[in-house]
Image (spheres, rainbow, N blue to C red):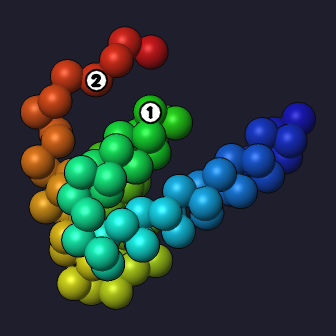
Amino acid sequence: MDEDKTVPRAIWTETLLDMLDKAVRQQRDDKSREIIEEIRDRGYAKAEVLRLAQTNFRQPDADRVERLVASISGVQRKAG
């Protein structure tokens, strides 16, 4: 069963990362924040989002993601 949960998660994660990469490169901060929040709502902690960006994005874009994550850290999140 664990495999069943992992495969779909990898697919949506890749899709969201692709969307985030495009939004960050286009400097669309509002859209980037929405995507970051969706990634976090799907169970990724702040540190995991940053690690994903460092692993998958060029350095300037990863730095931008770090700034965006910091800018939304104070925003109250929905109770799960």
Of the residues shown, which amino acid type is indicated by label 1?
Asp
Q: Quadrant of residue 76?
A: top left
* Horizontal and vertical percent position of residue 4: 86, 41
Q: Quadrant of residue 80?
A: top left
Of the residues shown, which amino acid type is indicated by label 2?
Arg
Q: Label 1: which residue?
A: 41
Q: Label 2: which residue?
A: 77
Q: Nearer the viewer, residue 25 or 47?
A: 25
Q: Secondary structure at mark 2?
A: loop
Say whether residue 47 is visible.
no
Q: Secondary structure at mark 1?
A: helix
Answer whether labels 2 and 1 touch (C-beta < 8 Å). Answer: yes
Say whether residue 8 is visible.
yes
Residue at 61% over, 60% down: 15
Distance from Cα at disc 2 to Cα at disc 1 = 8 Å
Q: How many marks?
A: 2
* Horizontal and vertical percent position of residue 45: 37, 42
